[in-house]
Image (cartoon, rainbow, N blue to C red):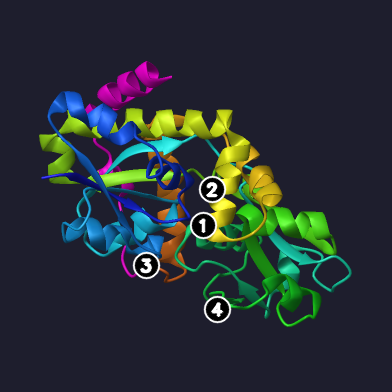
Amino acid sequence: MAITLGVHASNPSLYYLSQLDHLNEELAPLGETGAFHHYADGTRTGALLADGTIDFGGTGSTPPVTAQAAGHDLVYAAVSAPRPDHGALLVRADGPVRSVADLKGGTVVLGVGSWQTHLLAKALHVEGLSYATDVTPVRPAAGEDQAQRLRDGEIAGWIAQGAELAAARRDGGFRELVRTGDVITDRSVFFTRRDFAADRPEVVAAIGAALRRADAWVAANLAEAAAIAAADLGGTAEDWRTALAALPWQLEPATAGFVVEQQEAADIFHGVGFIDRPVTVADAHLPALEAPVAAAIARAV
């Protein structure tokens, strides 16, 4: 049976891996083949792992915390290097919001449940405000032009990423109230089921090697990668190239230092009621995975 990886457009490493042959090349020496399950909403990754639809997935920082809170027995496999320029909380350049405190009482559009929730919740927390009570977080609706809504004063802020952020920066009229790296490390996070990690660490390591090779391909082929994204996801190739060039395209094992980062997020989420019970992130850390994943990543460079 094929090893199935979950793919959604918000995780660039998995997205590009699904366009290349690296997964099967890395799995073949182990007698395995790979497959990809495409889905739209990365917040579903924990549930898809739990029900066996996928064996391995990747998101930003928030979904694995919410998956743990939902009782899913997951294990962190690898993380990207920090992505300080991955996204930004935008406000209107000539608008009334001059600081994070000025967001109080306003509506902020973001990918609720994604890393963007971590960004906004922590930015508010630092200022003594609450994600739960001091702002109204809303998901973007299909077909809405968030840049125009921000210009028109319909919303107080908008967390943008990828080609949309590149386009907003190019068009002007906005101010970056919070850059991702100002508040969180914003790593891309890869995780799997505990039984899968414990029984097949060599497969997890091979997936890590495939991801590292996909990352290296994107970094070396930005124009081609941008054209693929523009044709498939919308936006211009120019904006996608700008967005892709801002990412580190580096993979690391999930270490105790990363666990500390995630625990801070989990504590904030519980404090504001985004998750309904405390989460001990260390429960999802499997130290025995670090060495094989690190070796596979090093070999793949």
User: Where does the image place residue 271, in percent across and percent down from the top left?
Assistant: 44, 65
Q: CA distance from mark 4 to mark 1?
A: 19 Å
136 is higher (above) or lower (below) than 207: below
User: Where does the image place residue 3, in percent across and percent down from the top left?
Assistant: 19, 43
Q: Which residues are magenta?
A: 276-301
Residue wearing tag 2: 228
Give 151 or 256, whichever is nearer the viewer.
151
92 is higher (above) or lower (below) than 181: below
Q: CA distance from mark 2 to mark 4?
A: 24 Å
The label shown at residue 25 is: none
Callout in the foreground (2, 4): 2
The secondary structure type at the circle numbered 1 is helix
The label shown at residue 141 is: 4
Q: Amino acid at mark 1?
A: Asp
Hey, which residue is sitting farthest right in the picture? 94
Tell me, yes or no, whether the two marked residues, 1 and 3, touch with CB atoms within 8 Å.
no
Q: Amino acid at mark 4?
A: Ala
Return the disc, 4 or 3, that comes first in the chain's sequence: 4
Callout in the foreground (1, 3): 1
